[in-house]
Image (tube, rainbow, N blue to C red):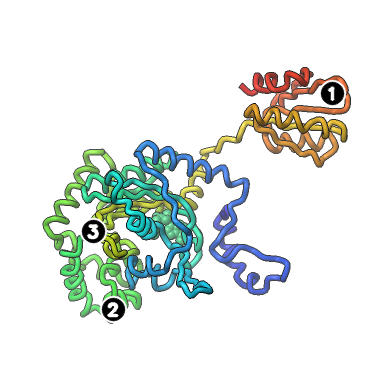
Amino acid sequence: MPKSKKEVSRNIKSKKGRGKEKANSFSTPKGMHDILPQDQIWWDKLINAGQELAELYDFYRIETPILESAGVFERSLGEATDVLEKQMYILKTKGGDKLALRPEATAPIMRSYIQHHLGYWAQPLRVYYFGPMFRHEHAQAGRYRQFHQFGFETIGDADAVYDVQLILMMRHFLELLKISDIKLQVNTIGCRVCRPHYQRKLQDYYKPLKKKICKDCQRRLEVNPLRLLDCKNEVCQEFKQNAPSLLNNLCQNCNSHFREVLELLENSEVPYEPNPFLVRGLDYYNRTIFEIFSGENNLALAAGGRYDYLAELLGGRLVPAVGGALGMERVIEIIKSGNNSAKVPTKVFFIAIGDQAKKAALPYMIKLRKAGVRVAESLGKDSLKSQLGAADRQKAKLALIFGQKEVFEESIIIRDMKNGAQETVSLSKIVEEVKKRLR
Ligand code: AMP
């Protein structure tokens, strides 16, 4: 994961370099990143918080393959969506199957729900997942081609209480990570009863403006009119403001569902902004949709909504459901840049000087590890100074110094790395002595 915008742009700029890569030098594909050892601590922090949250809300983990039949997405996301039109990584297997690297996990989870008859479990089924997603997007800071999501799905209930519970969970997730500067936006996009009627109204409004709106919107007008509300282009803003509102065109059921969502949010004292222009990139959503933005840089950190028709689109019966996903890279950028220091693991550093000490050290290191002590070492280095330097860099709490003299006397020196105090103890008591000092 890139550390700074500069680094992101360096990665992006290296496009030319990539083409000319020497035969023996490669770098990650554009928009994709290694997650290096020094960053794992942040990923663990996020994953631990997500799993803790899942446990509190009684969600169970589900994992689906990274590759799915392309049809899973072709049928469910909607033909005129960016993901389907431009962003899918598709491959043909030697056997002739058309597979896609998953751009999102909700459709695969619903595929799995239908395939494994998960509807027979107590409903609603509550599942969570985390892992990589792939979208061939225009790569830029915070927008990658391989990125990771941590998401939750509640499958099998249409009640507004589940929409709100999911929104509250996403907020709770960010709270656990000490991210409080956020904005929650909610909207409804109606259902298949009221939406087509509204879309026609929207088309009627936009048709006389066709020459004035941006090129993308001219296309949206024909293929996906709801996305007209989502346009960020300057020239379209004025027209958007005066467009008919979906809120005034909802059917009675959608209207009362949305009212209930807002009431429940208010009862929970959750600040939110209704945003009538919020529509989601994927077609399978209906009724409630939400997005949580960072107050700091306005990037979307999490998003989701209700998707009652997805199961039907994938060949199942009608299964109401609601879900949401958090963008892991974007959240990690925030927790890393805050003063939220990640905990350095408590460890000891085993220093062995000379061949005899190295050979004798191994069983004691194992003994310590079996007793639950985290032990690091740098046995390839010979001098005490360089091994102490390594212990310091790794922020070890204690260094255990084992030289020829100690081998002979069956003892070991324990050095407190903070104040430099040293004590010699008997080798046979190494585990107790170390544990006592770590406590
Ligand atoms: P979506 O699946 O589009 O609803 O996205 C849910 C969340 O995933 C967003 O709010 C972002 O935080 C994150 N996300 C989506 N696309 C990307 C991307 N290309 N790069 C990084 N994060 C992303």
Q: Residue at x 37, y 56 (%)?
A: 112
Q: Position of residue 144 (x, y in %)?
A: 50, 61
Q: Secondary structure at mark 1?
A: helix
252 lies above or below 339: below
Quadrant of the rendered structure where residue 412 is? top right
Give neighbour class at mark 2: few <14, some 14-19, many 20+ (Cα, 10 Å).
some
> Considering only order in the chain, which callout, 2 or 1, is on the residue closer to the N terminus?
2
First in sequence: mark 3 vs mark 1? 3
Whole-angstrom CA distance, mark 3 to mark 1, is: 73 Å
Question: Left or right: where does residue 200 sit relative to residue 77?
Answer: left
Looking at the rendered structure, the kind of residue marked 2 is: Lys
Query: For residue 229, which numbered disc appears in the image?
Result: none
**Location of residue 281 by image quarter:** bottom left
Q: In this view of the protein, which residue sits in the foreground, 54 or 360?
A: 360
Residue tagged 3? 318
Picture coordinates of residue 96 (x, y %)? Answer: 48, 75
Q: Residue furthest left?
A: 252
Locate the N terminus and report the quarter of the image it occupies.
Answer: bottom right
Residue 246, percent from left and from top: 19, 62
Mark 1 neighbour class, 10 Å CA radius: few under 14, some 14 to 19, many 20 or more: some
